Image (cartoon, coloured by chain):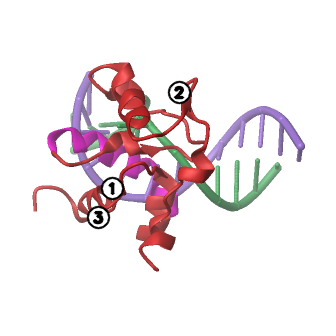
Chain colours: A red, B green, C purple
Amino acid sequence: MIQSDFFTSVFQVVKLIPRGRVTSYGAIAAYLGTKKSSRVVGFAMNASHAIPGIPAHRVVNRLGCLTGKMHFSNLDEMELLLKAEGVIVKDDCIVNFKQLFWDPSIELEL
DNA sequence: ACGCTGACGTAAC
DNA sequence: AGTTACGCCAGCG
């Protein structure tokens, strides 16, 4: 185990995010059963920098805003990647976030 | 070794 | 209904 179980769980869920979809920290946290640990989920994403295959750009806050873009090499990186997948990003926020929202507690349940 | 902060979200006032 | 405070876990000062 390179990361803690919680971190690993987060990574697993994030890696399962389909292309062109996005999810929120809270959704992942809720899926893990610790919705109060949403902060830790975001923090886990920080560790994702060392993990290839972790589309952190697909993970945004519950408002659909690219709050984590600042942590990318280039601020436009996250936004660019999302746009490349068909995600409409305006003012660092996903316009059709509700439409592209991918909830693990729902998608994975089905 | 102790305490603060941090890519959020919910609860309480 | 809006604002403030708190909780979670781990990394870093």
Res A92 label: 2
Compared to residue A74, the image places residue B10 above or below, namely below
Q: Could you classify mark 2 by the number of other residues whose Cα lies within 10 Å: few (under 14), some (14-19), or many (20 or more)?
A: some
Image quadrant where one finds the N terminus of chain A: bottom left
Q: Amino acid at mark 2?
A: Asp
Res A14 label: 1
Residue drawn where x is 56% and y is 41% of the image: A64
Q: From this viewpoint, is residue A108 visible?
A: yes
Chain of the residue that carries numbered disc 2 in the rendered image: A
Residue drawn where x is 60% and y is 52% of the image: A99
Extreme residue in the left direction:
A1
Disc 1 vs disc 3: Cβ atoms closer than 8 Å?
no
The residue where tag 3 is placed is: A9
Q: Position of residue A103 (x, y in %)?
A: 50, 63
Instruction: Tell me the chief SS of the magenta region.
Output: helix
> Does A36 lie within the magenta span?
yes
Q: Tell me which numbered mark, 3 or 2, is placed earlier along the sequence.
A: 3
Q: Amino acid at mark 3?
A: Ser
Q: Please identify, in this view, whether the residue under mark 3 or under mark 2 is nearer the observer.
A: 2
Residue A91 versus residue A34: which sits nearer the camera? A91
Compared to residue A22, the image places residue A77 above or below, namely above
Q: Tell me which numbered mark, 1 or 3, is placed earlier along the sequence.
A: 3
- Could you tell me which secondary element the residue under label 3 belongs to? helix
Q: Could you classify mark 3 by the number of other residues whose Cα lies within 10 Å: few (under 14), some (14-19), or many (20 or more)?
A: some
Q: Please identify, in this view, whether the residue under mark 1 or under mark 3 is nearer the observer.
A: 1
